[in-house]
Amino acid sequence: MSANDFKNLDTLAIHAGEDGVKYAGAVTAPIFQSATYLYGGESDYNEVKYTRLNNTPTHMMLNAKLAALEKAEDAIVTSSGMSAITTALLSIFERPGHLLTQSCLYGGTHYFLKNDFTRMGHSVTAVDVGDPSSWKAALRPETRAFYVESITNPLLEVADFEPILQFCRENGLISIIDNTIASPVNFNPIALGFDLAVHSCTKYLNGHSDIVAGCVVGSRKQVAPVVKKLNYLGGCLDAHACFLLNRGMKTLGLRVRQHNQNAQELARWLERQSFVKRVYYPGLESHVSHRNARKYLGGFGGMVSFEFKGDPREADGFMARLRLPKVAPSLGGVESLITRPTTTSHSGMSPAERKQIGISDELIRLSVGVEDLADLIADFTQAAT
Ligand code: PLP
């Protein structure tokens, strides 16, 4: 029996993929710090053992673990979340085509689609994921894929995925989802029927804010062209970062369950505070996506956004007075991080684009860490007074 035959995430996060990489009695997988490997008679370029070709023992171990965590057949680890997203899209769009997307996307993805992707001759239509008639109206003969996020950044909305998947099946579209914010603990999109899922492993999968990494998961058939494209584009993960990602993933379940619990309690607390205009958290009954979140997610995640009652300068002053959450972009680490998306993750959007999707200048996005909840609440209280 292999470690991958077990079914539970906490077991797989520790053991999956590691059967073949234990050396000299070591119980942990070593760092294979070698760019190249002895030629073993391979006849296909993609099979030659070389770090850029994503097939070293560490890459194979990580790919197996990521696939197991996402209940998928296959996975490929990449040098960043953006490398996963761009490589997956470019592998689908080898000829000019048309992509449907959700209107609110991570800023980097939005920037790529609006600029480089469009300049390559592709077109993109942002649709209302809650309105299937807008998808039908946007469909063209050259439409090839539908791209969404499982929990959107920064308004934390959750779409009704089943109608989207049905629409994709009926129209021969590849369905892709960015599952970064939910993490495999709270949602497994491939098991629901998505063709491909991408992650920024920089976030919850690694969990310690000390590396940048990404991955693409799906069926063998869907992942194979992504691997080929990645082998040429070169977005491979370095051996040392591979080691850190594998180590970080071992505590994924423990961490994310604590993130979920802290975020839920903090969101409830924020709703009652006079310095807060509005709280966005899918686990709150007041959130526009609460019903979809209950339908699809096993937990509501560690991200909470809220509108500060005051102008952006006052919001920045409030954030600077916090002692535990650090003012920094990114998310998903054990430490709390706080940012105003207008100045960081969504600064690539024009003010009009931000306004259209509901991102105000007073919006604060909080990545709730796994610190003690009472300490977090005490810190927010002192910063507000
Ligand atoms: N997807 C989401 C939802 C993100 O929040 C981010 C980064 O913040 C990315 C993708 C890009 O990931 P990376 O920074 O690892 O390239």
Image: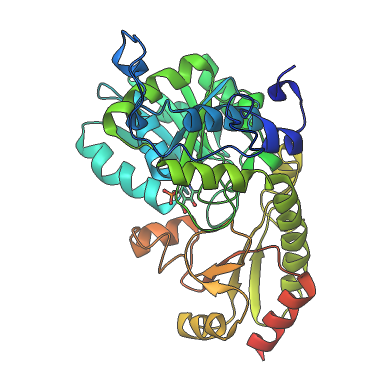
Q: Position of residue 120 (x, y in %)?
A: 21, 33
Q: Position of residue 14 (x, y in %)?
A: 69, 38
Q: Position of residue 274 (x, y in %)?
A: 70, 82
- Quadrant of the rendered image containing residue 44: top left
> Which residue sits at x=40%, y=42%?
238
> Which residue sits at x=39%, y=45%?
109
Way the structure is coloured: rainbow
Relative depth, front residue between 278 and 58: 58
Q: Total of numbered circles in the picture?
A: 0
> Which residue sits at x=48%, y=36%?
215
Looking at the picture, does residue 191 appear above or below residue 325?
above
Looking at the picture, does residue 259 appear above or below residue 71?
below
**Quadrant housing the C terminus:** bottom right
Residue 326 in view (yes/no): yes
Q: Is residue 119 left or right of residue 239?
A: left
Q: Residue furthest front?
A: 24
Looking at the picture, does residue 345 appear above or below residue 318?
above
> Which residue sits at x=43%, y=41%?
239
Q: Residue furthest bottom?
A: 385
Residue 173 in view (yes/no): no
- Quadrant of the rendered image containing residue 380: bottom right
**Quadrant housing the N terminus:** top right
